Image (spheres, grey):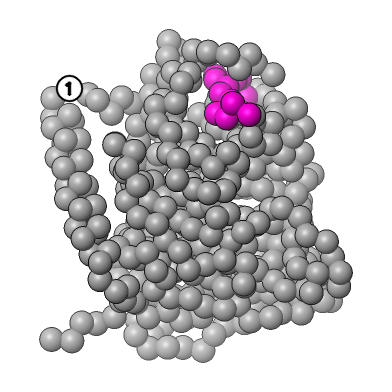
Amino acid sequence: MKNLSSHRSPLQNQRQLPNPRTPGSRQEEEKERKEQDDVENHLHEVEDDSEARCEWDFNLATVVSSSSSSSSIGGAASDTLGVIEFDPCDRLLATGGISRKIRIYRTASLLPHEGLSSSHEQVATAVLDHANACDFYICTPAKLSSLRWKPGSGGGVLGSADYDGVVMEYDLERRLPVFERDEHGGRRVWSMDYSPCAPVVGASGSDDGTMQVWDPRCEGGECLGVVQPSAGRSPVCCVEFNPFGGCLVAAGCADRRVYGYDVRRMGDPVLVLDGHQRSVTYIRFLDRHTMVTAGIDGCLKTWHTADHRLIRTYTGHVNARRFVGLSVWRGGGLLSCGSEDNQVVVYDKRWGSPIWVKRFEPSSAGAPAPGRAEYSGWECCEPTGAGFVSSVCWRQMGEDQCTLVAGGSDGVLQVFSGSRRRISQ
C-alpha cells in the first residue's frame, strides 16, 4: 500500500487531464454555463415551496425473473441485484450482485413493446425469464459491488469491483478478464469509476478507508494517487468522477461526509460536504455543477459543487442500513432510488417529496430462507423474508420518454417506461 501522507500524483507531471479553466472562448463558455446553472438552481429552490406534482405517466413494461428450474443462461437469480448499468449508447444493460455473475441484456429484449404503440397507450406487461432475456453472462470469482462501462471502449469493456478487494475489466466480446488490480489489501471494494476524459484513469473506494486512483493501461493498474479521506479511516463507500469533464473525483464515506479531490493533485480535498447523518452510500452528478448524494439516513441531497452549498434534501423512502441504489436521469431532472420497504421511488429535482412510488410485488424466486440474519450492504433480508429494492438505473436518452430499471433482493428486474403527460390547453 502506498504512503497515505501528502501525495503528489504522477498525473500532475506525466498526464494532463483537460483543465476546466482554459483561456479564451472556453473560459467564457464555462462562465456562461455556470451563470445559467445558478439561475436554474435558484428557480428550482423557489419552486420547492410548491407541492410536489408528478408530470409523468409510468407503466410497468417488463418483469424479468427466474423459474426455480432454470439452470441455463444466467441460472436462477436467487440473490440480490446490487448494481445495474446501461452502456453509454443505451443498447446494453449489465447487472451484477452477490450471485457472482455479470449478466448482459440487450435493451431491445427488455423492451419488446417499445415503439409498437402510442407513447401514452398502456400495453400489457411483458413477463420474461432471465434465461431467455439475458444475452450472455460471465462468471466472476467473487460477489460484485460495482460495475462501470469503460469510456472509449464502445461498450466492449466493463469494469467491476468485488467483495475480495479486486478491480477487474472484462472484454465482453471474448467474455474474458483482461485487467486485474488487487491493491486494497483484500478489503472489499465498494465502488469503482472511470474518468470521462482521455487518458482514462480509474478510481476505487474500499473498506480499507482509502480511495485509489490508477492507470488501467498499465499491468496491475499503476497507482497514481492514494488518499485517506477520513481521519478515522472510515470505509469509502462510493467514488464518482464528474462525467461532464474536469478534474474532480468525489468519495462518499462512512463518516457521513463527501470529499472532492482534484485528480491531478491528490492531497487535501478541494471540497467537503457535510450534511448526512449516517454513511454516504452513493454519489451521482445531475449536471456539471450539481451533485446528488444518498445516505443510510433515509434521504438524498443535491449540492452545488462551486460553493459547496446544499440545494435540497429529499425524503420519502426507507433507507436505514442497506445499499438501495441511486440513479439520475439528466434529461428529465429525475432522481430514483430503492427503498427497504420494497418500493422504487422517483423524485423530481425541484421538490423534496416523491412524485411516484411503486411497490415491488412479492416473488417466490430467490426468497430468503426463514430466520436469515441481517447484514449491512446488499446481503440482507429481514428474518421474516421481506424484500427490498436494491438497485436502480435510468436510461440516459430523450426528454419526454424515459426508462427506469430496478432490481430487487429477490433477483427480479422490473423495467418501467415513462412518458411526459400532455398539458391540456
Which residue is nearer to you in this view: 342 or 401? Answer: 342
Which residue is nearer to you in this view: 115 or 323? Answer: 323
In the image: residue 11, left or right of residue 121: right
Which residue is nearer to you in this view: 263 or 258? Answer: 258
Could you say whether the residue bearing mark 1 is in a helix, strand or loop? loop
* Residue 101 x/y as whole percent: 73, 54
Residue for point 76% across, 79% down: 364
* Residue 325 x/y as whole percent: 56, 57
Q: Where is 27 relative to 313, above or below?
A: above
Q: Where is 108 relative to 173, above or below?
A: below
Residue for point 74% across, 34% down: 187
In the image: residue 111, left or right of residue 161: left
- Residue 126 seen in the figure: yes
Q: In the rendered structure, which amino acid carries the disc numbered 1?
A: Pro
Does the stretch in magenta take in 228?
yes
* Residue 94 x/y as whole percent: 59, 56
In the image: residue 255, left or right of residue 370: left
- Magenta range: 221-232
* Residue 38 x/y as whole percent: 20, 46
Quadrant (top left/top right/bottom left/bottom right) for the C terminus:
bottom left
Question: How many callouts does the rendering have?
Answer: 1
Q: Residue furthest front?
A: 277
Quarter assignment of residue 385:
bottom right
Residue for point 48% across, 18% down: 267
Q: Where is 57 relative to 46, above or below?
A: below
Residue highlighted by disc 1: 23
Quarter assignment of residue 307:
top left
Quarter assignment of residue 156:
top right
- Residue 77 seen in the figure: no
In the image: residue 107, left or right of residue 314: right
